[in-house]
Image (tube, rainbow, N blue to C red):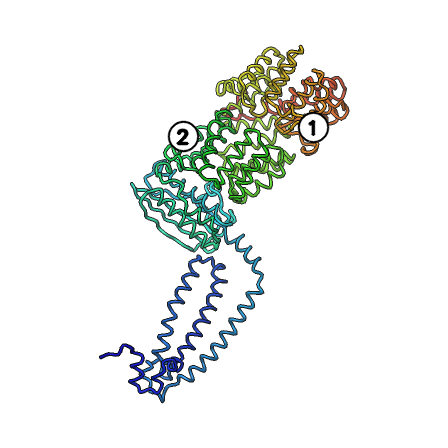
Amino acid sequence: MPSRWPVLAILKEKGDPMAGSFIQELKRRNVFRVAAIYVVVSWLLLQIGDVMFPALLLPEWTTTMLVAFLLLGFPVAIIFAWAYEITPDGVLRTQDVPEEQSIASDTGQKINRLIIGVLAIAVIVLVSRNFVDEPNSSSTAQAVGQSIAVLPFKNQSASTENAEFFAAGLHDELLTVLSKLGEMKVISRTSVERLDPGLSIPEIGELLGVVTVLEGQVQRVGDRLRINVQLIDVTTEGHLWANIYDRELTAENIFEVQSDIARTISGALHAELSDSDEKLLNEIPTANIVALEHYLLGKQLWGRSSWSALRSASDYFEKAVELDPEFAQAWAALAGVTIQMLQTGAIAKRQYLDVAEPAVSRALELNGILSEAHAELGNLLWTKGKLVEAESAFAEALRLNPDLPDSLLAYGTFLRSTNRPAEAIAVLERALANDPLSPLIIFDLGKAEMYLGRVENTLAYAARNLEIDPSSVHGYVANMQGYLVLGRFDLAMSWMIKLMTVDPVDFENWAYMAIWLELIGLPDVSRKYLERAYELGPEEPVVLKCDLQIRSKQGKKDEVSEIARRAIDARLDDRWYSNRIFLRQIRDDATSDDELTESSNLYRNRHPELFESSPTITVGNVNAAADLAFLLQKLGQDEKAKSLIDSSFNWYQRTQPQGVYSWAIGIVEVDLLVAKNDYDAALRVLGNAVNSGWNYSWNWYIDSPNLDPIRNRPEFQAVVSKLQNDMKTQREAYLALPDMGEFDLRN
């Protein structure tokens, strides 16, 4: 009968005197020594792997695989040590080696020396690792190694627009998830979408400042979805990882695949995932596949930014939340596309609030840590004039996701628009680091530079935008605005005509062309542009504002008054500071005490913050504050007028860069100095402004009753003469320009 203990049976068969002691036999066969050397060498290999694998950009599972192989190899080594012996004749089975010929003891001594040597190496490795400056190497790996550009997924489905949008939507959502994980640098969608398709992988890495690139293809057939992805090292162009996901088309499967790709990329880049990261990856924003499709389609249309695309995107988001009322991301997106519609003039403020207020509230109710929802809360509060609360909301959005370009752009735009351009530049540069080819971020950076008087930087950013995407409006708008600040209507209008070829239906562009042409003395050409503006945007605030200023220059007082009254009675949005024009005209028309009081009440209705005991002055109301102060003086309310003048002047001195006269607030400093009866200083500032190139809406400013106390001074008359001569020069320069095509209406 065979023994239940084969090892002991072997010992008995050999007649070994140590057969009674299994432990002694293990020692004789060097099993313990082999186990010891195996453990020490395994530890040493793990230390080497821990150092080398990140440098080689090997995925994180490589370390796990090494541990698994070493664990599996341990019993193999033990069995080999027991069953075999190394002899001068080679490796033989132990039971085939006669006892008198065994050299196991000599082999054991060699193993002892080997153990001592390996232990010495292990001590050296351990000591050297303790003296390595780990924080520096770690930060370098984070800055260089934890960076990725996810290229747009190629659509392998039937070539329909929705299939393209679906693939692009999956790509966009993966980017959004990756940007929220750990501290990886993830290049934004707008930048990767604008890459030249002819660029090689190394060229993409150098251009975007990343060490890895993810490529992918999406194929959708019926209710099946196949996603093929490859992670590539930009230096070697070698594949670090690749996988094919073939799943049933459900929302749950899409999010599962997305999370798996994100986890794998994080591992490959050695980006440690926190508990909150894991929670994010386990979330399923919606289980409704149709709602998800509408959301993805809406995101892609949103990126096109035209009025028609924005409206279509809004429709898709509304359908998504109708299909799944608990889809938080769709609610936030609905608020986001609506604020862009407001900012571009596609909808009025009331329309925005009607949509955004419930959308933001619902998004935050469903997911209180959704960074996009907090950014949209910031936009909502900003629109409602609650600037302190808005800034807190933006801060929370960035705390939740510090490097999301959309949130950084929203906050940067807020800072720029609320007269904090230096702070805006710092925030926008962070956004640009993660989205280096974004025309909107580059445009906002240029605009912030312009607010600081650095117009040369504005024009440089404009050139960069035109290089990235000549079909985008941003390069043309930036050039046009930059030359306006320099006082060159002729060059600004040439860029405006180029802008019209890209965006011919924006009525505001046509209205501004009309007033600039009027200012340089081409009323007949001006009229053609104004007529087109009214065709595209009748009763729009900017169109009415420009028309009012044109008719004011022409001396048509009754028509000017009628436009101002009509605009105020209609309670039109304050678009590009249009209200200040309408309110001032009604103020200037007032002659009796009743009319003056009515005008004061209109200011109170539109700017209640100016009637507080400590008036709140902003870039959006400082001109209205100056106009109101003169009105209060006429009403005999000298103390209130003085408080308003002092608050406005202190704000101006505190916030405005010296010698910068932007089109946003113009030469309001002159008005305030006149109100303070400091006429010499007012004339000096006016002269400096004109010498620096200021002439924006100059006729409207110069004709203001605010400046009556200095109107007859020789210095004032010299400024007017200089402006008139400059307009004549620019008229000749504009007429000398070659034909600029369809939207050039000079002939």
Residue 336: percent from the left, percent from the top?
Answer: 48, 34
From the image, tell me which residue sits under label 2. Answer: 315
Residue 377: percent from the left, percent from the top?
Answer: 51, 34
Q: Residues within 10 Å of mark 2 (few under 14, many from 20)?
A: some
Residue 317: percent from the left, percent from the top?
Answer: 41, 33
Q: Residues within 10 Å of mark 1 (few under 14, many from 20)?
A: some
Residue 202: percent from the left, percent from the top?
Answer: 48, 51
Please, what is the three-letter code of the amino acid marked with disc 1? Ser
Which secondary structure, mark 1? helix
Q: Which of the two labelled residues, at mark 2 and mark 1, occupies the earlier sequence position?
A: 2
Residue nearer the viewer, 408 or 646: 646
Residue nearer the viewer, 212 or 601: 601
Measured along the vertical axis of the image, is residue 554 above or below residue 94? above
Question: Which numbered tag is attached to residue 647?
Answer: 1
Measured along the vertical axis of the image, is residue 452 above or below residue 278? above
Please, what is the three-letter code of the amino acid marked with disc 2? Asp
Measured along the vertical axis of the image, is residue 482 above or below residue 116? above
Residue nearer the viewer, 388 or 222: 388
Quadrant housing the N terminus: bottom left
> Which residue reaches farthest bottom?
100
Asked whether the viewer can see residue 504, the reply is no
The mark closer to the camera, 2 or 1, is 1
